[in-house]
Image (cartoon, helix red, strand yellow):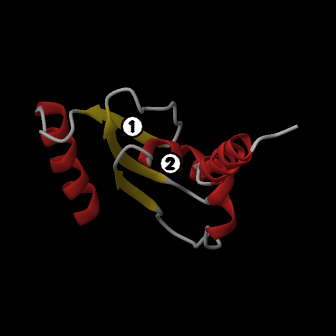
Amino acid sequence: MKTVSDFLVSLFDKAVQNAQPRYCLPGHLPPPVKGRNVVLGAGKASAEMAKVLENHWEGALEGLVVTRYGHGVACKKVEIVEANHPVPDQSGVEASKRMLELAKS
């Protein structure tokens, strides 16, 4: 028999699971558009979100995402850069400069 505590923990676990990009992002993606599609992102979940986007996007895709060390994932079309947070390191500074250039292009 489950206790109230067990029940509450199971609710929490389900909420955390449903907040994962692989579960919550696909249903909110816009339809693909013609032309160049550039992904720019930053944050702990950004690499996982880029991976989910790659797995569900049917058009051309490129981009650069910077995430905290230990949060990178392998992507084929979006480059993932790991950097320090909250105090930027050289990797983060260089990635942000490249992101600005990509946005300008």
Image quarter (top left, top right, bottom left or bottom right) of the N terminus:
top right
Report which residue position mark 2 lands on: 50
Label 2 SS: helix
Give neighbour class at mark 2: few <14, some 14-19, many 20+ (Cα, 10 Å).
Answer: many
Disc sitting over residue 80 in the figure: 1
Relative to 67, 13 lies left or right: right
Amino acid residing under circle 1: Ile
Please provide percent x and percent y for residue 48. 51, 43
61 left or right, relative to 55: left
On screen, residue 87 above or below 60: above
> Circles 1 and 2: CB distance less than 8 Å?
yes
Residue at the image point whose x is 27% and y is 62% from the top:
103
Kind of residue at badge 2: Ala
Q: Which mark is residue 15?
A: none
Q: Is residue 8 above or below residue 30?
A: above
Q: Which badge, 1 or 2, is on the more N-terminal residue?
A: 2
Q: Quadrant of residue 26?
A: bottom right
For the point 64% across and 48% down, the residue is 22
